Amino acid sequence: MTEALDEGPFFHGTIAKLYVGDFLIAGYRSNYRPDVVMNHIYFTSRVDGAGLAAELAAELIGGDAIPRVYAVEPTGPFENDPNVTDKKFPGNPTRSYRSRAPLKIIGEITHWTRLTPEALQMWRERLIARRPEERGEIIN
């Protein structure tokens, strides 16, 4: 386990409707690369980072998907997310982590900095408009 920069609170962005006491677990397909089954569950200490992940997940799914952010508690060891730490953002300024252990939902967050329509359009062009295999490697 890499030394983590935070002790919390931690957040997870998703489109799933969850409840306090539920658990998020690894083993589901990536929102960004549906051909990849994830070995980890991802989270951050930045509520706006979790909000961004939730909004992108909603865009990728389409339809009436609702972005949601949950306060979570790791139930086991976790590490810095190698998909962003040192690979893209040395030192983990995004405060992004991953764990093979479940995350326990301890609350829902209803306020975070939402993407402007212009920022959402930029993400559509940069990520969402690309085919999944063009969205980049995921270190799983």
Image (tube, rainbow, N blue to C red):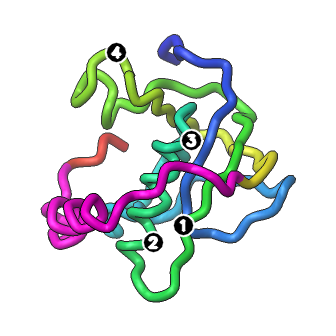
Q: Is residue 55 left or right of residue 85?
A: right
The residue at 33%/26% (across/down) is 85
Image coordinates of residue 30 in percent, x first then y, are 41, 61
Farthest residue to the right: give it: 21
Q: Is residue 129 visible?
A: yes
Is 134 situated above or below 79? Answer: below
Q: Amino acid at mark 3?
A: Val
Image coordinates of residue 54 in percent, x first then y, are 49, 60
Name the one closer to the observer, 36 or 60. 60
**Residue that numbered label 4 is attached to:** 91
The residue at 30%/64% (across/down) is 120
The residue at 17%/65% (across/down) is 133
Q: Residues within 10 Å of mark 4 (few under 14, many from 20)?
A: few
Is 72 situated above or below 45? Answer: below
* Mark 4 → mark 1, Cα distance in angstroms: 28 Å
**Residue that numbered label 1 is attached to:** 67
Q: Amino acid at mark 2?
A: Ala
Q: Are marks 3 and 4 in contact (CB under 8 Å)?
A: no
* Mark 3 → mark 1, Cα distance in angstroms: 13 Å
Q: First in sequence, mark 3 or 1: give its number.
A: 3
Q: Amino acid at mark 4?
A: Gly
**Residue that numbered label 3 is attached to:** 47
Q: First in sequence, mark 2 or 1: give its number.
A: 2
* Mark 2 → mark 1, Cα distance in angstroms: 6 Å
Q: Residues within 10 Å of mark 1 (few under 14, many from 20)?
A: many
Q: Amino acid at mark 1?
A: Pro
**Residue that numbered label 2 is attached to:** 58
Q: Secondary structure at mark 1?
A: loop
Residue range highlighted in magenta: 109-136
Farthest residue to the bottom: give it: 63
The residue at 67%/25% (across/down) is 8
Q: Secondary structure at mark 3?
A: helix
